[in-house]
Image (cartoon, grey):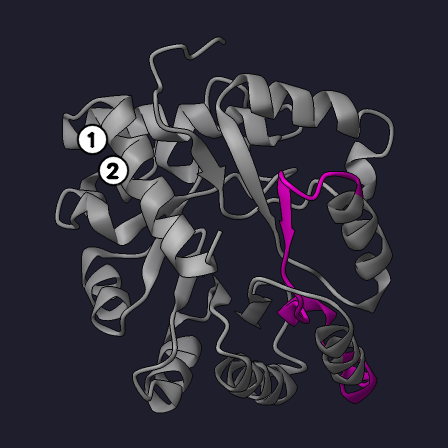
Amino acid sequence: MSNFWIFDMLIDTHAHIYSEDFLHDIDDVLQRAYDNDVKKVILPNIDSGSVKRLLDLTDAYPHLCFPLMGLHPTSVASDYKEELEAVEYWLEKRKFYGIGEIGIDLHWDRTYLKEQQDVFRYQIKLAKSKKLPIIVHVRESFDEVLPIVKEEQDGSLRGIFHCFSGTEEEAKQVIDLGFLLGIGGVVTFKNSELPETLKGVALNNLVIETDSPYLTPVPKRGKRNESSYLVYVAQALARIYDVSVNDVAEITTENARKLFGI
């Protein structure tokens, strides 16, 4: 899978490679990423239980791994205030490159919808006060997420709608708000409508991501996802836009660099 024809490096803007799925081979995973031109990996947090692994990995690979701090919507429960305190505690202790991953997830249940909305808004305000970008998780919740981002957008808010798989109209709404679309393995799936959607969206509105260990791209579906597979996402975009993989690398890497300041 050597990609000697990529002159620009790739940046994986969303990976959970600090998770327990990578406990036994993380060094190999990062070596494979590096060998496949993925030279920087952005690590969004989940909740207080994931912080130690996240920071341990960042400390072990400071030039490769860049941590974000946030509370994931699926971790929002009755103890959410304590979880937000932990987010604020860590933001004072360490350097983070963004707030994430945050948002609303209604895939499993709607029990904590109100709390998810409050937590999302709270973390957006934190991001604005810290002048940091946000990584937005949207799962079966676009109509709930968009109005909050719209209300909070004062010209300073920026970030990524992670794992975007919506319509062209939704893509345009996101872009109009000054956000980038995070494109991952879904763009390679056989029945995905994303390639068609993206034909109406300029490449310079995109960043690429893996969401490792989830959403593994074709031809690796069924396996654990990892950052080295980012190249398959880049190749899919090169086909959609009829440009070289190097063009995809150059544009998406520049977007990621500007957003995260890396």
The residue sitting at 39% across, 81% down in the picture is: 149
Q: Which amino acid does label 1 sit on?
A: Ile
Q: What residue type is labelled 2?
A: Pro
In magenta stretch: residue 32: no
Residue 129 drawn at (x, y percent): 53, 87
In magenta stretch: residue 72: yes
Residue 19 drawn at (x, y percent): 77, 44
The residue sitting at 33% across, 89% down in the picture is: 154
Relative to 151, say whether 19 is above or below.
above
Which image quadrant for residue 228? top right
Residue 222 drawn at (x, y percent): 61, 24
State which region is magenta.
Answer: 60-83
Q: Residue 195: which disc?
A: 2
The 10 Å Cα crowd at callout 2, few under 14, some 14 to 19, many 20 or more, is some
CA separation in Å, label 1 and label 2: 6 Å
- Tags 1 and 2 in contact by the CB under 8 Å rule? yes
Q: Nearer the viewer, mark 1 or mark 2?
A: 1
**Residue for badge 1:** 240
